Amino acid sequence: MPSQDFAESLLHGLGRQAASVESVDEFAQSMLTKHPSALRMRWGLSQDDVDFPLRPIAWYRQGYESTDPSIRPSRQLSYAAGDYYLQDAGSMLAMAACETDQALPEGEAPLICDLCASPGGKATALLENLGGGFLLANEPIRSRLAPLAFNLARTGIPRYAISAMDPSDLADQLGGVFDRVVVDAPCSGQALLGRGKQSLAALTQTQIEHSAARAQRILAAAVKLLRPGGKLVFSTCTFAEQENENQVDWMIDHCGMLAAPIDRLLPYESHHDSKCAYRLWPHRHQCAGSFAASLIAGFDVASEGVFRERKKKRKGKPSATIPDAVAEIVDPASVRLKESEVILWGWPVDAPAWVESVAESGPELAYRTGQTWKPSHHLARRRDLDHQAVFDVDADIAAKYLAGEAIACDQKGWLVVRHGNRGLGWIKASGGTGKNHLPVSARS
């Protein structure tokens, strides 16, 4: 049982929300329990697209829980192929507030910014249901960029860029640009206690106040990024009222934001006057728990949308020799290229004009080892391209490939290994053998 001090600290942080907790002991015990990850199905897929039993999650139409404890969803081919993303069911509350589990209105092509995007649980859901829009996935902490880039590449959709800017600096450059901004704010992380990713210091008033102050600075930048009438979805993985409902009050009272209630989330409504804040509780909803709020930018306070491009000194670089495996797939006229010393990125030609000025990375086309350019793993995952040089494999061969093994192949050259019409990665085949070029991070 949790200690009396634990329960008292928890109640103190909950503030007015404590009235919603029937049993403090049950809540505290559930907080310290590790809840299994849930499946967020790729947009357009359902539980019928996997071969193990699932049950729906009530608050998110694309969310499911596995009902067979002997199945490890992370070891399934459908996971490797990008058919679903694994995350705590509670984190899907924010995606429900973004309404990424329903079709966009016809003709809508939103510009979206995920301001604190890594590791990509929310960014990938936004990207999968983007239509002809564009996503800027911003992550200020550079050490967290690699998992974000990997997870975005798993979607096979190229309509994104990754930036690594302080939110205030990004708002200065792209103020008033976005139709939607998502802020999964850094917080005390009380909902992470059960996974061992946070300590009991998360319950202290010092940590709560520090986290609230940091999040408020980020939220101020988020407001500036919105166009008039744009939507802000704010979420945390903590239960402290100061980090949650109080922030909503501050945005309404001091930033000119307006409440934007979501009718279908009414069963999860927080004890709050705005009617636009929602909570999941671990002891009620069998997840780690979370908070989300939905607001819109008032027309009298939003930025005017002035894009200021950063000026960069141009440095001479040797021009890239695009590998044949890339040139056969990607029409140069269909992409806007950006090259570093070792990586070549390519955005759709209709990407926003500001992309190159803020992008740290994006959809990779090729990478260089020494003087040789090779096709990127990201390119093999693309679902919008005609991969003509492919090697179709059955489930057994796919499993060997995903384990990092070389596979038998009677073709030659760079080939996309494909299972069930979904690209898994590259091999370079010669002499009857396909050398495995799957990145270590993608192996299972």
Image (cartoon, rainbow, N blue to C red):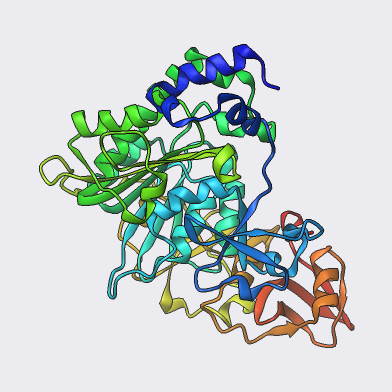
* 315 left or right, relative to 7: left
Query: In x, y percent, where is residue 92?
Result: 50, 51
Query: In x, y percent, where is residue 332?
Result: 46, 77
Front one among 79 and 370 = 79
Quarter of the image with the N terminus in it: top right
Quadrant of res 405: bottom right
Would residue 293 be seen by someone viewing this image from the given angle? yes
| Up/down of 359 relative to 42, above or below | above
Quarter of the image with the C terminus in it: bottom right
Residue extending farthest left: 300
Would residue 360 be seen by someone viewing this image from the given angle? no
Residue extending farthest front: 22
The number of discs equals 0
Front one among 112 and 410 = 112
Name the residue: 56% across, 81% down: 329
* 409 left or right, relative to 306: right
Name the residue: 66% across, 75% down: 423
Name the residue: 48% across, 14% down: 205
Query: In x, y percent, where is residue 124?
Result: 51, 58
Front one among 2 and 114 = 2
Name the residue: 25% across, 40% down: 224
* 134 left or right, relative to 193: left
| Up/down of 195 relative to 105, above or below | above
